[in-house]
Amino acid sequence: MTKSQELRKEIQTRSQKLSAIHVKLANEGRSTFTDEESKQAKALQAEIEDLDERATSLEFVEARDAADASKETKPVAIAGGNEASKSEEREMEKIVREFSFTRGLGMELRKEKLDGLEKEMRDAAISEAAGFGGKIEGIAVPASFMAASKRASIVGNQASAGVTVATDLSADLIDSNRPKPRIVELGARVIEGLTANLEMVRVTGHMISKWKGEIETADETTPTFGKIEMSPKRLTAYTEASKQLLIQSNTPADYEAFLRRDLLKADELALDKAALTGSGVGSIPRGILNTAGINLVQLGANGAVITRPKIVAMLRAMGVADVSLDNLAFLTNPEVMAELMVTTIAQGSDRYLLESAKGGTLMGYPIKFSTQVPNKGEKGTSGETLSSMIFGDFSEVIIGGWGGRDVILDPFTKALEGMVRIVSNSYKDVVVRRPQSFSAVIDINTEATAA
């Protein structure tokens, strides 16, 4: 039995224990766990998630070992860390460095059969996609590769980050300015490697204790529950490249880095936008501003300038909803940033609502800015001029991922121009766990600073 299989067996054992707790609850006709049962369930869930992540990493390491049995890697003890987990991390980082999207795409264009690491990654991605009914059509990588790529992309050491960090691009690959994704930076939680729809039970009503006389009958109150669900939704993007560039045996490393970075950034921006303003219609996730139950603070019939009392009203709404005020932050766009910096705390004051945009705070809470936050809202006679500001606990936003990434070649659409279209597909969803954890203003007039 391999180490990954041993971990999978441990996952199965813990899953059975977790199931037994739920069965006991149902058999006894109860609707809530005891304190001890709740602790056991949470501990088991955490262990299952940790074991699953380790098993997934090990499976890819074992796949490589099987493909090249002649190579033998001796573990190196690392002070201050778990030897097995560090070894898995190093192996995945090595895979990230050696894997090449453009090599795989070039092989497809030349009608060659995939081999080496590119084939191993595709096989792993196919197996992973089968778990949630997905289908792989092109060059593909599994979820663990994407997670490792993301970690590598923030490493400052060029030797360890290799081709994932494009710090020395050639002149013709200078990137354009793009919005700054903020949701994950502010604390949104990311769950990768899902293989089925994820259901979360949410308590919507609690027991209520009341004072009664010595022999008066107690009032019955029953806890109530709701359910929120995450399911895979296709997130897709495409870019174009010269056919000659891809078909050459040695594609420039800077283009490989550019392609990886561009695919990752496209997903980050789309998920960030969905988490903020997603409509929840069809295949689009539902974002914070379209989630029923958030605390909306209104400024005026046609919108209005943001003021200190209205910001206080946002804080008040959170406190009244019993939201902890410890882990909150503001998020808005540059238009509102400028408005806050020229709006005094009170008439005649020489202090402004926001004194500094860099590392600034508003009412003692961190504030971040992104052009992803709406600035073309409409209300009454305002026209499309109104901006939004969100205040809340961003760890209540959950981003789920099913499988890794499937990259498909389309050599036909732009064939006359000698270009190849590269289409990326991945499966994601976003959900807000507790809407009351957010307060928002969506009708901020920023005309005062428009000039």
Image (cartoon, grey):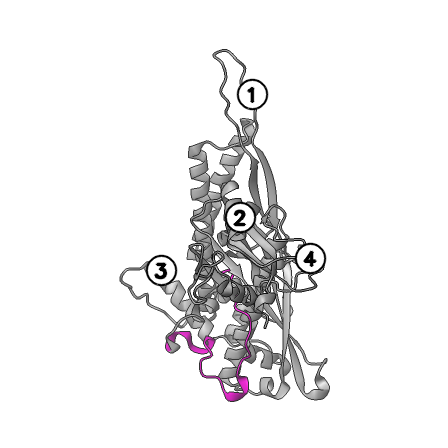
The single residue placed furthest to the left in the displayed view is: 79
* Coordinates of residue 289 in the picture (x, y in percent): 61, 54
Residue 379 picture quarter = bottom right
Residue holding disc 3: 84
CA distance for labels 2 and 3 = 51 Å
Query: Label for residue 219?
Result: 1
Residue drawn where x is 55% and y is 73% of the image: 178
Answer with left or right where residue 89 lies relative to residue 388: left
Q: Looking at the picture, how far across and down is residue 335, in whole percent?
A: 56, 67
Question: What element does badge 2 sit on?
Answer: helix
* Residue 257 lies in the magenta stretch: no
The image shows residue 269 at horizontal and vertical percentages of 57, 67
Q: Which residue is mark 4?
A: 379
Q: Say which residue appears at 28% left-offset and 60% top-offset.
A: 80
Indicate the amino acid at tag 4.
Lys
Local crowd size for mark 3, using a 10 Å CA cut-off: few (<14), some (14–19), many (≥20): some
Q: Nearer the viewer, residue 213 or 126?
A: 213
* Gap in angstroms between the C-alphas marked 2 and 1: 35 Å
User: Quick one: SS at disc 3?
Assistant: helix
The mark nearer the N terminus, 3 or 1, is 3
